[in-house]
Each structure stands twice: as C-alpha cells, then as structure tokens.
Image (cartoon, helix red, strand yellow):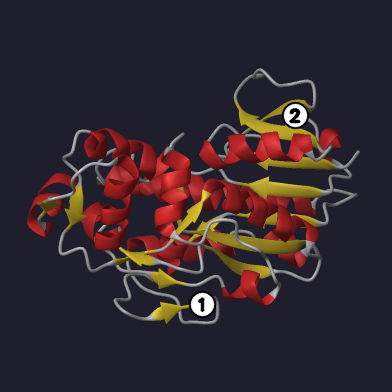
C-alpha cells in the first residue's frame, strides 16, 4: 500500500482528497496541528507544528518512505477583513509552514518522491484581458508577492532532490464549501448579481477536477514546477452570475458597485473578487489531462441540481 501525507486535510480540498486517495487504496497520513484527531481506518494522524517554534514532529519515523506529500495548509483568505495582523497570518501560515515541511522532508533518509505544495493564481496579479499560462511573468500586489514567497519556501525540498510541484489553484467550486457555498444563500434568495461591472475574468475549477488534477500531478513523474489548476474556459463575472441564476432558477438583476465592495472588504476586494485573472491550464493540457467540467453553466447545473 502506498502512503501519502496531507496537511490542511480538514479543508474543502483536503477532505475530498483524503476520500479519493483512500478509495484508490492509498494509506493517508494526516499531519494535524495539536493533538490527535479522529481518523478513518485507512488514515494515520501525526501531530505537527507548522509554525517553526518547536520540533515539527515528535518523530520522523512515520514519515520515512512516504510516496508523496501534499501540502494544503494556509490561513483562510476570506475569513475576516485584511488588517495588518490578518495579512501577516496569511503570509506566515503559508511560507513558514512550507519551509518547515520542506526542511523536514529534506532531512529524511527515505524521502518522498514528490511534494505537491499548494499555490494560487493570485501569483499573476490582476491582469485585465491577458491570457496567462505558467510561462507568463508573475504579477505584483499582496497576493502575488505572498504566492511567490510561498513557492520559494519549498526550496529545501527541491535542493534535496525531491520533485516539487506547485498547483496554482483558481476558484474551487463546490456547494460543500469555499466561495460557492457562501454565494448560494444570496442567489437562492434572488439577490445575486454581478460584482462591479462584471467584466473581470474568473478562473475556476470544479472540486472533482481539482482532486483529479492533484492525483494526476502525483502520478506524472515528469511534472515539476507550477501547474495552473483552472478550467480551460475561464468566464467573466457577469457570465458566472447568469449561470448561477439559470442553475437555481432565480433572477440575477442586482449588482454590487465597486465602491460598496471596497467599503465592505477593503484591499481584499481589489485583490480577489474585482481582480481580473484569465488563467489557462497550459501544463495540464499539454500532458493530456482530461477535465470533467469545462462549461460553467453545465457544471453549476450539475452541482446544484
């Protein structure tokens, strides 16, 4: 039985990934903060400290001979206004935990074949109408600089000869969590509408495609570096809004002006929901990865049926 370790295993992506890996016959090793947590019969929980203030794990023995490690941990971007303290938590929860994990893995005698260390398409910044692939220049701004440092933090694992892949996540869609779950009550009440002028590009991916893509990155031994985890067909916010309305059979006549979003969310509004990122999954497509969900209307109708 192959063994895969996961951090951030209780989040939306982490939870779905654990279930999928177990169904494929993997033994799942969960690196969890603090004390022991409930695990299924196919899982092992190992307490770890991603802050770097103490020993990362009590013993490295359970981590020896892992086939892969998937690092998903990080402070929730959308949980609270971006104060100076919040921004520091966003950065440190990503960069410090990645550096701690990469250094830990580099110290093992029997190192994992691959480290899948999460990143995000925020690394490109707001780029208007540009079509962006993994080969394009990186952007500027808080999220872009954070993601750059996040990816660099995995350098100790790279230097130790571990294959490192950075899945740059777009907006992961699932009614079970994330952005879509937060939108549903508003749209079901008939109060949904475009954000700002609705012209900004939204690069999205269904949860099942995100899980399949991570597993693809584990299996494809030739892949390393960045891989955009987004649908081949990004959509404008206004198109996404109309698709939500059709899927829920609700009107979408309202709009939230930019100044209102900025008053409510501050800097987060410009860096996230108002930023335009037309990102394409060039690496996955070149390796013949097959997306199950490409059309936003069909995807939302299937999810929300």
Disc number for residue 133: 1
**Is 257 on the left-hand or right-hand side of 147?**
left
Disc number for residue 190: none
Residue 16 shows in this picture: yes
**Whole-percent x, y for residue 257 in the image:** 9, 56
**Whole-percent x, y for residue 156 in the image:** 70, 60
Q: For marks 2 and 1, give the one nearer the viewer.
A: 1
**Is 40 on the left-hand or right-hand side of 88?**
right
Circle 2 residues within 10 Å: few <14, some 14–19, many ≥20? few
Tag 2 secondary structure: loop
> Would you identify the image quadrant in which residue 65 lies?
top right
> Would you identify the image quadrant in which residue 225 lies?
bottom right
Vertical comparison of 304 with 41: above or below: below
- Find out whether the residues at labels 2 and 1 contact each other: C-beta distance under 8 Å: no
**Whole-percent x, y for residue 26 in the image:** 82, 38
Residue 75 shows in this picture: no
Q: Residue at x 67, y 63 (%)?
A: 165
Vertical comparison of 144 with 301: above or below: below
Figure quadrant of the N terminus: top right
Q: Residue at x 73, y 65 (%)?
A: 158
**Is 92 on the left-hand or right-hand side of 229?**
left
Vertical comparison of 29 with 225: above or below: above
Q: Residue at x 65, y 57 (%)?
A: 213
- Seen from the viewer's position, the closer of residues 174 and 166 is 174
Q: Which residue is mark 2?
A: 58
Tag 1 secondary structure: loop
**Is 90 on the left-hand or right-hand side of 109?**
left
Q: Residue at x 18, y 50 (%)?
A: 193
């Amino acid at each position: 039985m192959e063994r895969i370790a996961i951090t951030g295993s209780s989040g939306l992506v982490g939870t779905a990934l654990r279930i999928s890996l177990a169904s494929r016959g993997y033994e799942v090793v969960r690196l969890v903060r603090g004390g022991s947590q409930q695990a299924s019969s196919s899982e092992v929980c190992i307490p770890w400290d991603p802050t770097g203030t103490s020993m990362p794990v009590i013993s490295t023995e359970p981590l020896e001979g892992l086939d892969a490690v998937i690092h998903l941990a990080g402070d929730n971007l959308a949980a609270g206004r971006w104060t100076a303290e919040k921004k520091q938590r966003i950065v440190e929860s990503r960069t410090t935990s990645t550096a701690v994990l990469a250094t830990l893995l580099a110290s093992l005698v029997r190192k994992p074949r691959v480290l899948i260390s999460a990143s995000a398409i925020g690394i490109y910044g707001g780029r208007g109408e540009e079509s962006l692939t993994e080969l394009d220049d990186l952007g500027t701004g808080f999220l872009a600089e954070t993601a750059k440092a996040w990816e660099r933090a995995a350098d100790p694992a790279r230097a130790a000869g571990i294959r490192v892949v950075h899945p740059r996540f777009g907006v992961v869609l699932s009614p079970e969590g994330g952005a879509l779950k937060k939108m549903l009550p508003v749209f079901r009440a008939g109060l949904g509408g475009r954000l700002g002028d609705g012209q900004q590009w939204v690069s999205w991916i269904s949860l099942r495609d995100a899980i399949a893509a991570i597993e693809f990155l584990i299996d494809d031994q030739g892949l390393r570096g960045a891989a955009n985890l987004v649908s081949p067909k990004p959509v404008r916010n206004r198109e996404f809004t109309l698709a939500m309305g059709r899927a829920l059979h609700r009107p979408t006549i309202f709009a939230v002006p930019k100044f209102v979003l900025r008053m409510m969310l501050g800097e987060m509004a410009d860096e996230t929901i108002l930023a335009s990122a037309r990102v394409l999954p060039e690496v996955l497509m070149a390796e013949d990865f097959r997306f199950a969900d490409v059309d936003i209307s069909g995807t939302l109708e299937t999810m929300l049926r």
